[in-house]
Amino acid sequence: MESLYLLIPVSLIFCALAVWLYFWAVNSGQYDDLEGEADRILFEESDVQPENNEGEETVPNSETDKKGDAP
């Protein structure tokens, strides 16, 4: 019975800390872009075409994009 006097406050502090850490992570932007990191891991960066300043995709130059094809 005496151990409950210690375990209950410790468990309440632990739960309060877990809730505080969750809200801190949400407010600091940890969960803003969940799909971006998954896409970054699964797809190579060369597969994604960079966008220019006008928001249009750039057209790859066939001469400069060939890697190791020249004799």
Image: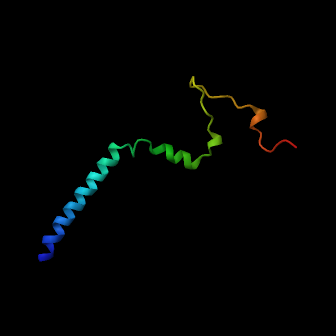
Quadrant assignment, res 7: bottom left
Please determine whether, in this image, residue 5 is positioned above or below residue 32. below
User: Number of numbered discs present?
Assistant: 0
Q: Position of residue 67 (x, y in %)?
A: 77, 43
Residue situated in front as seen by the camera: 20 or 41: 20
* Residue lying furthest top: 54
Q: Name the residue located 16 percent from the left edge and 65 percent from the top edge.
A: 9
Residue at image point 63% right, 35% down: 49
Specify whether 14 is left or right of 30. Answer: left
Which quadrant: the N terminus?
bottom left
Q: Is residue 19 above or below residue 36?
A: below
Q: Is residue 5 left or right of residue 69?
A: left
The residue at the point 57 percent across, 22 percent down is: 54
Q: Which colour scheme appears in the figure? A: rainbow
Image coordinates for residue 15, horizontal then vertical, percent: 24, 59
Image coords of residue 59 (percent x, y): 68, 28
Of residues 39 and 21, which is closer to you in this image?
21
- How far from the left and from the top, in percent, is residue 39? 54, 45
